Amino acid sequence: MTPVIALHGGAGTILRHKMTPELEGEYHAALRACLQAGLDVLRANGSALDAVTASVMALEDDPLFNAGRGAVFTTDATHEMDAAVMEGASRRAGAISGICGPRHPVLAARAVMERTEHVLLSGEGARHFVKGAGLEMMPADWFGTEARRKALRAEMERRERGEADDGDPARKHGTVGAVALDAQGHLAAATSTGGMTAKMPGRVGDSPIIGAGTWADDETVAISATGHGEYFIRWAVGHEIDARMRWAGQDLQTAAGGVVEELGRIGGSGGLVAVDRLGNICLPFNSPGMYRAWCGRDGQIRTSIFAD
Ligand code: ASP
């Protein structure tokens, strides 16, 4: 099996008319470097799970993306991060929600999968577990960036003025995630996010919800989503795509593209990255763009931001 990998840096892309060539170049370079981190694992015969973990760790460390360092703020100007991992061979999964502390929330999710009998830990208990697991912890102010602070201020002021949302996805959205198929034919997915700017404290998005923002089953598909989490939860996006492939015999493009298009029609902006058991890759989104990178069976790394 030729290994393949795809990742996203969120559907919260800067609108094209606000993007500068320099910043666009920075995004492409970052996407490529983060994909390479996972690809190196796969090419050294590593597992899909290790590959998606490596790519998501790289994305979490890059403040351009809304996960780990660079996470968005809640209305209380705090960070509450969500993350999940899932492996397709066994449907083992681990997730963490509403946490601020671990430098790499994806490692916290993986520790839940590998070291507890649970799937999802949240809040104080999660933090306590993560500290005990010996993961690297960072102070809260390490995660915040000026750009995210500005986005929070702008969003809070908009709400105070009672103005309608201007639809700029960069202000609100973002998440990172990766999906991979390894040489042994195993699939895995990982997702990590700060959530949505100015979310209510306590709000949980789709990323740590297995079957919504994160999904992997070796018989069908691995998925990592980004976008308006409430819609992705209500549509059980990951599992819905799996079901259309498994029970309705749809191919990846029809199943994943169809679900994302339907979400777009009802206001659920966003997208996802998906790879199926044969190594086909699909990167649908209904938003103006989605930061993404992939390396398919041809071995070429590609990066893209907007619809073209
Ligand atoms: N899906 C994430 C959430 O709802 C945010 C995003 O991807 O924009 O928490």
Image (spheres, grey):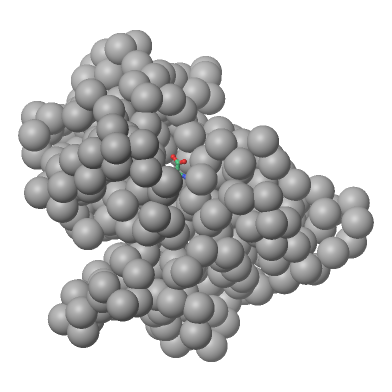
Q: Position of residue 173 (x, y in %)?
A: 38, 50
Residue name at image x 82 percent, y 54 percent: 244
Label count reads: 0
The N terminus: image quadrant? bottom right
Asked whether residue 187 is in view, the answer is: no
| Residue 11 quadrant | bottom left
Q: Position of residue 264 (x, y in %)?
A: 64, 57
Residue name at image x 91 percent, y 56 percent: 248
Residue name at image x 52 percent, y 19 percent: 118
Which one is in front, 269 or 115? Answer: 269
Vertical position of residue 11 compared to residue 190: above or below: below
Asked whether residue 237 is in view, the answer is: yes
Q: Is residue 178 left or right of residue 154?
A: right
Please tell me in which quarter of the rendered image ligand 1 is found: top left
Vertical position of residue 29 compared to residue 121: above or below: below
Which one is in front, 48 or 192? Answer: 192
Q: Is residue 209 left or right of residue 25?
A: right
Q: Position of residue 49 (x, y in %)?
A: 47, 51
Residue name at image x 49 percent, y 52 percent: 226
Vertical position of residue 212 compared to residue 96: above or below: below
Q: Is residue 230 left or right of residue 241?
A: left
Q: Position of residue 296 (x, y in %)?
A: 54, 79
| Residue 140 quadrant | top left
Which one is in front, 218 or 64? Answer: 64
